[in-house]
Amino acid sequence: MARLKIKEILKNGETGSEVVAKGWVRTKRGSKNVNFIALNDGSTIHNLQVVVDVAIFDEELLHKITTGAAIAVTGELVESAGSGQSVELNAKSIDLLGAADPDKYPIQPKKHSLEFLRENAHLRFRTNTFSAVFRIRHAMAFAIHKYFNEKGFNYLHTPIVTASDAEGAGQMFRVSTLDAKNPPLTEEGGVDFSQDFFGKATNLTVSGQLEGELGALALGEIYTFGPTFRAENSNTTRHLAEFWMIEPEMAFYDLKDNMDLAEEFLKYCIQYALDNCMDDLQFLAQRLKEEEKNKPQDQRSMDLIEKLEFVLKNDFVRLPYTEAIDVLKNSKPYKKKKFQFPVDWGVDLQSEHERYLVEKHFKCPVILTDYPKDIKAFYMKQNDDGKTVGAMDVLFPGIGEIIGGSQREEDLEKLTTRMEEMDIPAEEMWWYLDTRRFGSVVHSGFGLGFERLMLFVTGMGNIRDVIAFPRTPKNAEF
Ligand code: 4AD
Ligand code: MG
């Protein structure tokens, strides 16, 4: 008999039919005569209740069926008396596939802290919270490909190892083939890192954008979706050293087209989650409520599902950076000196400022545009005022910046002048500048931090809890 997934059994299983279910034991409880096993196989947040008549099974076998053990159960589906489940499985035979020593298995049927589970990253998938998060993560990745495919974008694979610093921020992990014990030396006697990668200095990519622009200026519309790396000290709940980024890049799009796409795209992903992940979202919504039940009312988050629906219903507010600075300077926290970081025209906004705008002032996602050129990357479209660039950051409640993007400077001379001002060697970027030499056009793009989207959709509070194997300054073991 073929195995059925628990999701399928709970949805379509007919009473009276015989099925095989395989999975991991979440709990086993019961009396002398009957045991109830909650079995989960990862296909759904819900467990299949297995009913075991103790008299017909070997005592030693039942003894080994403990939390974390893997079993295969053959039996008959019967109507369930328990609430919230349509059927349960009356066990006829049980195979112990893999035991889990109860004295050593770290995941017990009680509530573990997220911190504890982070240290048990290999087993945290076995919990309801993390299996829900990772099913949603899968669904979001699929939705992203589906969205761009439907719009005729081409998925472009940009390199992980590269010589370029796309953001010009110097936050790169070096990739080296040098013999650490006997490295080549410079004339001054230091290690000659320019020899890193078979004679060239290379690093892990911080963004696929520059390569993406080459694709867009030939294929029209492309997107990347891959790992990116930032060697910033990322000990916050919003930063990872390794994160996944989605970077669409479009020829013939100006800043307005870019904003329209970003808003439509985010809403599409959120709608997809509501349409396809409701069981998991409901579980996470409940989890959040429980977590916050001891907080004062005004500090509790909005219900997760209401929050997602709210974002769908409303147009994002769009306003220039300069106006946002005015809003901030007229705000209560500014006047009462409650912001930790100062606000003035020219400063890079901190997440406390971004969140004030979104959560307190506009109460809605916000797209800020036209930032000062000195706090943005070299490639952004220079505005006529000589001071700002055609940048756009999308700010989300609870998150701050979720998307960063811009219209790109398509004029060769303006671009190379800016690169000179910023000490970016034009000769090394000949391949990039060729797009502006030959058939240059207006174009735009943006980057969505995948884990930041995941934080928003799942309501989780720490970015380490929405990626399977977080890379942070303290964690790179496995
Ligand atoms: O604003 P960023 O640095 O922009 C770029 O990399 C552009 N090249 C994107 C483009 O225009 N194609 O990063 C884009 C997004 C941020 O808005 C944020 O969501 C996410 O990437 N991000 C991070 N996510 C997790 N950990 C980090 N350390 C992140 N740094 C950026
Ligand atoms: Mg940014």
Image (cartoon, rainbow, N blue to C red):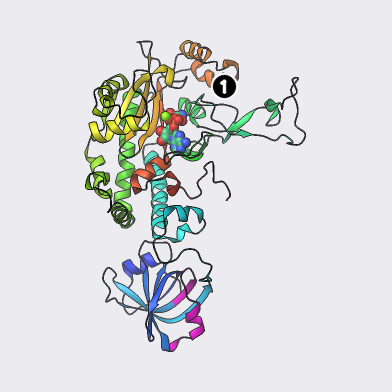
Q: What residue type is labelled 1?
A: Trp
Q: Position of residue 20 (x, y in %)?
A: 43, 74
- In-front residue for pair 37/111: 111
Q: Magenta residues?
A: 56-73
- Residue, far front: 336
The residue lying at 36 percent from left, 20 percent from top is 371
Q: Is residue 436 visible?
A: yes
- In-front residue for pair 262/373: 373
The residue lying at 23 percent from left, 44 percent from top is 298
* Above or below: residue 347 compared with residue 231: above
Residue 57 lies left or right of residue 304; in this view the side is right
- In-front residue for pair 392/28: 28
- In-front residue for pair 351/37: 351
Badge 1, how many Cα within 10 Å: few under 14, some, many 20+?
Answer: some
The residue lying at 57 percent from left, 20 percent from top is 429
* Above or below: residue 42 compared with residue 436: below
Ligand 2 found in image quarter: top left
Identify the residue under disc 1. Answer: 431
Image quadrant of residue 452? top left
| SS category of the residue bearing label 1 | helix
Q: Position of residue 206 (x, y in %)?
A: 52, 32
The residue lying at 41 percent from left, 85 percent from top is 54
Count of all numbered marks drawn on residues in the image: 1
Residue 106 lies left or right of residue 338; in this view the side is right
Residue 341 part of the magenta segment: no
Residue 70 part of the magenta segment: yes
Q: Where is residue 319 in the image (x, y as percent from the top left)?
A: 27, 24
Residue 376 lies left or right of residue 175; in this view the side is left
